[in-house]
Image (tube, rainbow, N blue to C red):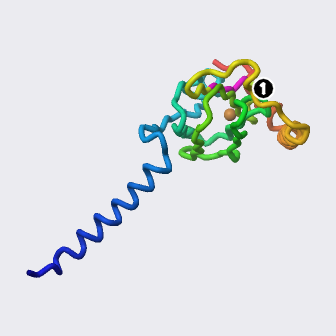
Amino acid sequence: MNIKGFGFPVRWVAIWTVTFGITLSSSFPARAADHIVKIVSDYENLRMVFEPKYLKIEPGDQVVWVNEANEEHNVMTFPDGFPEGASAFQSPIMTKAGERFSHRFEVAGTYEYHCLPHLPMGMHGLIVVGQPSEHDEFHKPTTAEIEAYRKLMLEWFDEDDTEMLEREDRAAAPDS
Ligand SMILES: [Cu+2]
């Protein structure tokens, strides 16, 4: 019997089994799903929005944010905007259409997130993983976390002041 011909398929199945096995065990529960949130720059209506703004998912699911335009956006939690036992998350500033950021949610509860460049425009989103948090189940930020957060805000708005004011002027200017 010539088993030479089986060499490749057998090896391939072995690799497939190992890869698939790892995928299953690392994404418990096995039904874990990906959810897309579009980062929309709606210039026509002068809105910057996450779509959908509210998302209900299950523990273990992953959310992928996709920047839809060549516009500066990010995704970040405030220090007290996520459940006890979960971690804060923050994307880099995205600038190009097609850029994406993903986060897997393991801890159940309510997560509020925001776009730093568009805080003044109320660019926020909400994700509930499993059951919403009770009031006292939210993370209590440490002094260090609050300091780091303030620093981030100041850095962004200081360096971006001029550009932001110009944007507001543009937004306020009547155009027909
Ligand atoms: Cu934004």
Residue 5 place in picture, x, y as percent: 16, 77
Q: Secondary structure at mark 1?
A: helix
In the drawing, does residue 111 fall left or right of residue 163? left
Q: Residue at horizontal 50%, vertical 50%?
A: 26
Q: Indicate the quadrant where residue 114 lies.
A: top right
Q: Residue at horizontal 69%, vertical 31%?
A: 113
Front-most of residues 74 and 82? 82
Count of labels shown?
1
Front-most of residues 56 and 42? 56
Residue 154 place in picture, x, y as percent: 89, 39
Front-most of residues 163 and 88? 88
Which residue reaches farthest left? Answer: 1
Front-most of residues 45 and 117? 117
Q: Residue at horizontal 53%, vertical 39%?
A: 62
In the drawing, does residue 135 fall left or right of residue 31? right
In the drawing, does residue 116 fall left or right of residue 67? right
Query: What residue is disc 1 on?
Result: 120
View quadrant of ligand 1: top right
Residue 72 visible = yes
Which region is colored magenta? 122-126
In the drawing, does residue 95 fall left or right of residue 139? left
Residue 44 place in picture, x, y as percent: 59, 24
Of the 4 image quadrants, the one containing the C terminus is top right
On screen, residue 129 above or below 30: above
Q: Residue at horizontal 49%, vertical 46%?
A: 27
